[in-house]
Image (cartoon, coloured by chain):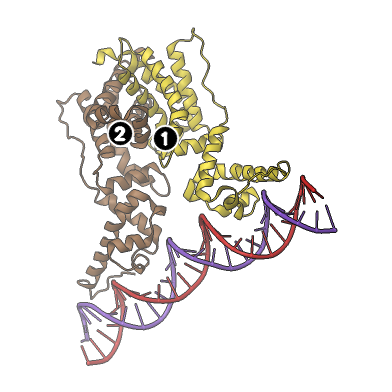
Chain colours: A yellow, B brown, C purple, D red
Amino acid sequence: MAKATSRGTSALSHRSAETRCKLLEAAGPIFAEKGLNGVTVREICGRAGVNIAAIHYHFGDKERLYIATVRYARERRAEQYPFPDWDAAVSEAERLHGFVETILRRMLEPDVPWQTRLLMREVLRPTEACRELVEDYFRPDFERLVEIVRALMPGRPSAREARQAALSVMGQCLLYRIAGEIVRQLVSEDEYEEAYTVESLTDHICRFSLAACRAWESAQ
Amino acid sequence: MAKATSRGTSALSHRSAETRCKLLEAAGPIFAEKGLNGVTVREICGRAGVNIAAIHYHFGDKERLYIATVRYARERRAEQYPFPDWDAAVSEAERLHGFVETILRRMLEPDVPWQTRLLMREVLRPTEACRELVEDYFRPDFERLVEIVRALMPGRPSAREARQAALSVMGQCLLYRIAGEIVRQLVSEDEYEEAYTVESLTDHICRFSLAACRAWESAQ
DNA sequence: ACTCGATTCAAACAGTTGTTTGAACTGCCC
DNA sequence: GGGCAGTTCAAACAACTGTTTGAATCGAGT
């Protein structure tokens, strides 16, 4: 199966790599939108312009193509929406603002790259070995948020308290990704279009969370 | 199709209603767990103990059975986990606590009835005409939360501000339903088992949200 | 020019899906 | 008992699924 021999490493295996790539690039957006079971191999191959049997030949079966697609998405995850690289002078409040805005953009922007959407889907629907995905895709961001939040809370909050406060921030962000349609219906359509942009959502979530963090001790 | 005529309204239509009910009761838990496309009609009919063709005869097709199941779930939604019926003496903070605890129980308790699970699934995956579902299943609770939160915020918060604060509370609750597995992994397994019960989650979310609401003006 | 492994391709396969059919059964009414 | 609408049933249907096959094609090495 696509074994590069001593001789033809140039053109033949080049074609192989090209087909693999075409499959991954075609499968990515479709998997990202409809998930493993919402897609047919014929749709993937059709859009990739390759034969149906190519999936079996290059990946074994549909599920291994899916896994390879997730891995591919993670490897060359578009380095869009990177977190700001703060210097020491930036206040914690500003860092929180930057963090929330970045997270919201990653989740809500309509033209977010399919790599991100696929990883998001995978993360929200813990199926198989996506534990490592959480480890190196989600945890770094989360730990970063924990530190920001911790610095915002007066006194010496325990690590556990800081983690829970960070989860409260994440929950507020996630809501609009998960239940965006319901939110749109609960507040009116007009108000949603006007007031539920990334910018104003960022403002609200930061304002809410900042108030909560700063007033932490007093609520004890 | 199951038309009750003038004469045989007793035994025949009784059998019809019984079969319909058996189908709904059998389909409900399976739909709630795996969704419309994750279930086969054979599995449903097998568990219901009726013939495959019964679905077509009584409901038309699989999708209309699904819709009927959702409606059925809504009609006789188990009145478990009702909101406390507060009298005037109860403080707003206590109301918030009761609200959050009820929502968390509805979402996190493992033995929540299938009716609730099915409605939750429907609400989280806005497919077809679940708009009315949001209207009479979700909105009443939401409006109730808005009022609680509004009363907690100093000054005279606008309706929009109150709605957004309420959404921040909902988001915190939803996180543990949607991303419970990831949360479990992010905080350690041990900490999760110990500190992420409904009770302590309620405490944290209320503490966080209370602080945020009460400090609202000052963050302006 | 020929060989030979790598790769592609059209076609078929085997299994499952939701749906439909037409006959058989049920129980009420005349 | 005969008629008859309502209901059940086993079987088949048609469409689609992921997978496999075996021959055809390609392209570098000799």
Can you name the residue that lies furthest to the top here? A89
Q: CA distance from mark 1 to mark 2?
A: 37 Å
Which is nearer the eye, A179 or D9? D9
Amino acid bearing label 2: Glu
Determine crowd level at label 2: few under 14, some 14-19, many 20+ residues with C-alpha closer than 10 A: some
Q: Height in image: B155 above or below A13?
A: above
Badge 1: chain ID: A
Amino acid bearing label 1: Arg
Residue position marked by numbered label 1 in the rendering: A131
Q: Residue B62: give x, y in percent of width and height.
A: 39, 60
Residue position marked by numbered label 2 in the rendering: B143
Residue at 45% x, 10% y is A91
Q: Quadrant of residue A20?
A: top right
Specify whether B13 is left or right of A171. Answer: left
Residue at 29% x, 38% y is B107
Q: Height in image: A204 above or below A1?
A: above
Q: Is residue A199 visible?
A: no
